[in-house]
Amino acid sequence: MNIMHVIPGSGGSFYCGNCLRDAKFVEAMRRSDHRVVKLPMYLPLFADEHDLSRDIPVFYGAVSLYLKQVFPLFRKAPAWMDRLLNSGPMLRLASRFAGSTSAKGLEEMTISMLLGEEGQQKEELEKMVDWIADNCKPDVIHLSNALLLGLAQRLSERMHVPVVCSLQDEDTWVDVMKPSARESVWKLMSGKAEHVVSFIAVSDYFAGVMKAKMNLPPEKLRTVHLGVDPADYTFTAADRKQRAIGFVSRMCHANGLDILVDAFILLRQKPGFRDVRLVLTGGSTGDDRKFLAGIRNRLKEHELTGQVEFHRDFEEKGLRDFLAKVSVVSVPVRNGEAFGIYLLECMASGVPVVQPALGAFPEIIERSGGGVTYEPNDPEHLAAALAAVLEDPARLDQLSRSGAGGVKQHFNINLQADRMIRIYKEATGTAVPVSTANEQN
């Protein structure tokens, strides 16, 4: 099949689960001899831009997109200025300083994007569609998330192909908006859903969330869990390492880094845990600077700065180095997540996870067997959960081995990609329809 994935990028400034999800599916489908084109939006997916081809431009460049939305004068800018604003150096700079992971202040742009050909970005949409028409002949187009639904109608009509759409954590963007904008966005997304043949949620938990928020008909909704290739990770039993707690995600308030740091402080005060260290990775955006300064000050107050490492490189080799250092990982996301692909990367490497009983975390941990959950999501209960795992080498070893086995059995990206291809073939009418129930079976 010829498949096109339309994927928003983060520029590599922080650990982007959605970017990793899409990249891993693309790689797996290419290994199965399918032709897959990644069409980037806003920013490159990764810091070194290894995901991009010289022949594929970044559409809806983040810098020009923002300027055109806020300052109407830029909508009449000459083509050379657009090329400058969308150049690699400018986009890399934007990824470092922009707080583009928060919807606050971007409500109007989000609504405009969802309006598609009726929004302020209609010229960008036509550029994208023209490029696809001139350079590709996809059998199916896959949108990375429902915030891109403004593209669906025009892509479907012009290319005469079905559009499918992944669902992952859209609520974390929309629900922080002011009430009037939030209502408008959910209404627009619900209306635009008619131009999509199938929605693919990353967990059963999130399928339920989006079914309610977007009024999605059950026959359009599937679950295909995320996956990783176990061959990409080196398994080391957790009980063979020095005791260290890891954090791997964007280092911000929403992801609960302060909860983990406070739990670490409490744990270090317990007898028998003076050797435990903390290793943090995942990057940040400009919005997180004040928060991270507060984290560093808190560690300094408790004289723990020397026991905490900020591991800078979190892509590929850097991530492998991080996983080799830690014996357990916790990312205490305040409101849970639709999935959390870092759970699979940790467990595939033999690192158990300790997560709050929120969102899809219980679903993933129960299926894999590679971790524990706790509640409520506060430093005291997290410290207790970490202590229970770290003080019991036999349990740590069992969780380590169970998690790696669970990833191989239930979250192998090659098997998940086959399930995704099945949905594509059904959408194009080249396969017998499959059940709209969970695609894992």
Image (cartoon, rainbow, N blue to C red):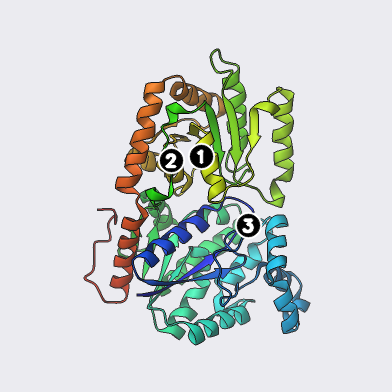
Position of residue 36 in the picture relative to residue 314 (left or right): left
Local SS, label 1: helix
Residue 285 drawn at (x, y percent): 68, 51
Q: Position of residue 196 (x, y in %)?
A: 40, 71
- Label 2: which secondary element: loop
Q: State the separation of the CA atoms marked 1 and 3.
A: 31 Å
Q: Is residue 419 left or right of residue 338?
A: left
Amino acid at dot 3: Ala
Q: Quadrant of residue 53?
A: bottom right
Q: Residues within 10 Å of mark 1 (few under 14, many from 20)?
A: many
- Residue 200 is marked as none
Instruction: Describe the element under mark 3 as helix, strand or loop.
Output: loop
Residue denoted by label 2: 349
Which percent across, then down, holds residue 411?
35, 49
Q: Amino acid at mark 1?
A: Leu
In the rendered structure, which disc, 3 or 2, sits on the residue that comes first in sequence?
A: 3
- Residue at point 32%, 66% (across, down): 421
Q: Position of residue 88 (x, y in %)?
A: 68, 68
* Marks 3 and 2, how far apart at CA: 34 Å
Q: Are marks 1 and 2 in contact (CB under 8 Å)?
A: yes
Give the labeled residue for mark 3: 103
Q: Quadrant of residue 238?
A: top left
Quadrant location of residue 396? top left
**What separation in Å lies between label 1 and label 2 (alpha carbons)?**
7 Å
Circle number at residue 323: 1
Image point (56%, 38%), residue name = 247
What type is the residue that disc 2 sits on?
Answer: Ser
| Quarter occupied by the N terminus | bottom left
Q: Is residue 420 above or below residue 17?
A: below
